[in-house]
Amino acid sequence: MENQWIVGVDLGGTTTKLAFVNTNGEIAHKWEIHTDNSDEGLNITTNIAKAIDEKLVELGISKKDLLGIGMGAPGPVNYEKGVIINAVNLGWKDHYPLKERLETETALLVMIENDANCAALGEMWNGAGKGAKNLVCVTLGTGVGGGVIANGDIVRGINGAAGEIGHITAIPSGGAQCNCGKTGCLETITSATGIVRIAKEELVKNGTNGFLAEKLAENGTISAKDVFDAARNNDTLASKVVDEVAFHLGFVLANIANTLNPELIVLGGGVSRAGTILLNQVKEKFTKFAFSPVKESTDIALATLGNDAGVIGAAWLIKNHKKI
Amino acid sequence: MENQWIVGVDLGGTTTKLAFVNTNGEIAHKWEIHTDNSDEGLNITTNIAKAIDEKLVELGISKKDLLGIGMGAPGPVNYEKGVIINAVNLGWKDHYPLKERLETETALLVMIENDANCAALGEMWNGAGKGAKNLVCVTLGTGVGGGVIANGDIVRGINGAAGEIGHITAIPSGGAQCNCGKTGCLETITSATGIVRIAKEELVKNGTNGFLAEKLAENGTISAKDVFDAARNNDTLASKVVDEVAFHLGFVLANIANTLNPELIVLGGGVSRAGTILLNQVKEKFTKFAFSPVKESTDIALATLGNDAGVIGAAWLIKNHKKI
């Protein structure tokens, strides 16, 4: 298998990440192209096929050394049919036959999956969860997404909506309004947006001075990073916000673990770059809410693959399908 | 497969249920024996072997028509090793080699599993969840247990503690004390014991008259059934208790569904016999807490197999293992 490669593709609204991944889940070559979503996204698959062909020439690799293309795409995916159910940002209308189109363009096997699930599979294959057969990944970014792996495979659910960890209700009554229409969703608290919202509310209530009040006066806004930076310097208001974020995240993660008892819960996404200050507090709250045998066996760790998780997890789809 | 049978065994602390189950998950013959847990549970497997032999003679069936024995046992199970980790009620000490002992006694293939998981597998195979590959079962009895099925197989987790739905925290702060050491567990609210506790607390606060106050004066106690009976007759206090129980159950089930998006959540156990008054209210609360695509696709239903779920699910273990 030394000279065989899987192409991993992580399709985003503005950028498409590509990589040649070996059968051990290691990236040999990676690059990016612009996502051209004009003309109802008609050029997307053509551009990916062209990018792969050019890279083969550049590296002097023969197309027959490619085992297939695994691809992560935003939005709900019908995994079995290889269809994107809808992806407004890409210009694709209802039920776009992505697998079929890309197979026609490249003459290679194509498998597709939701991008959050790909990130989870990447961390399972060659990241923080290396070797774990039961794994939950939570992506704390502008929003909050997730991927659930049980018995070594992704859990998709009956409507492809499994892993919607951002829309788990963390506050049963009186939580903030979520974009999804509900209130009190985890996303309203632990996304970058949620953290900033809570910090600003605290500033209105209590914060006439301190680091965050200064930042806000200086820049007209604050970021989630500002909140963690301030908490790291023992700023009272920021510490209170981090404590609140960790409380609700610990609560939700413990309840997921009480249901699934995964080996590991992996925290990824921009907010997770806060590092140990977040991780340690989440672990502490998790302990409070986890059933004893779960507390002893389910660990929480930071993601290790960063932005590469998506292409590596996408490549895993081919490895898994071909039973390599 | 017409004349082939799987023996399903559901081992309880006082009674052992047995059944001959066909390869479609239908019970042909069922009976019970006393569980003899004297002498450190040494007679349990011998008695099961003897009971099967006697039944074969009685029915004129040859032992070679038996495909194997699937068995559900209380407490944590190491499924792969076929070992019961501990089962104090049965007299078995640490890591009792149940599979090995019963295979020696019967000369048949034996597969074992936790009893709550067997009940879930039974409902999946031939009960409320017939054909569903993603299914969550919740048993509302004296305590609250559960079983999670994803991608057509049981989710056990890294420490065998998956499906501990009774110990999901339903009330993040200020909930009642649970036997497990935590507070606010679902079990403290939606078990028969929990429902009675809440009703009694309401009676102390508000209930000098009404159906439940009368029952309590008459019998010195009330049951969960009394609460549902009273609520069905529009008793104000009982309706308030049912509303509270349904609220927390709907909250927890919606969050499980936001994580796993199962086709169906099945409610079983004694409390579920309350029927539509419970089911309808839980569905209503579920709707409030479920993410929109989950709400549209995950259904909630009452269990249909009753006490037979355990033996049918136990038999499934053999069907699954032999890939019949």
Image (cartoon, coloured by chain):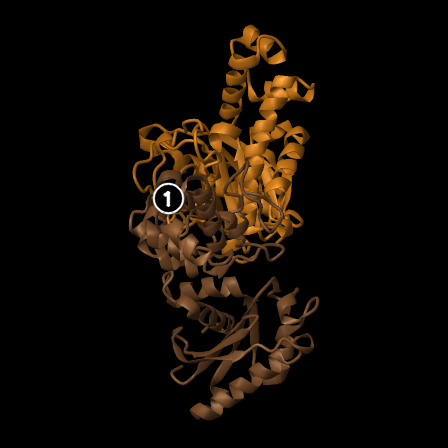
Chain colours: A brown, B orange
Whether residue B195 sits left or right of residue A124 in the image: it is: right
Residue B30, visible in the rendered structure: no
The chain under label 1 reads A
Q: Amino acid at mark 1?
A: Leu
Which secondary structure lies at badge 1?
Answer: helix
Residue A221 location (% of width, % of height):
46, 55
Q: Name the quadrant of the C terminus of chain A.
A: bottom left
Whether residue A252 sits left or right of residue A180 in the image: it is: left
Q: Name the quadrant of the N terminus of chain A.
A: bottom left
Residue drawn at x 52%, y 54% is: A163
How packed mark 1 is, by other alpha carbons closer than 10 Å (few <14, some 14-19, many 20 or more), is: many
Residue B216, visible in the rendered structure: yes
Vertical side of B277 occupied by A305: above or below:
below
Residue drawn at x 39%, y 57% is: A225
Residue B155 location (% of width, % of height):
47, 50
> How many numbered marks appear?
1
The residue lying furthest to the top in this view is B218
Residue drawn at x 63%, y 12% is: B211
Vertical side of B134 occupied by A7: above or below:
below
Residue drawn at x 37%, y 33% is: B43
Question: Toward the viewer: A202 or B166?
Answer: A202
Whether residue A235 sits left or right of residue A173 in the image: it is: left
Question: Toward the viewer: A3 or B291?
Answer: B291
Where, by quadrant of the figure, is residue A291 drawn?
top left
Question: Toward the viewer: B160 or B177?
Answer: B177
Whether residue B207 sits left or right of residue B164 in the image: it is: right
Residue picked out by circle 1? A237
Question: Toward the viewer: A288 or B96?
Answer: A288
Vertical side of B298 occupied by B213: above or below:
above
Residue A254 location (% of width, % of height):
42, 44
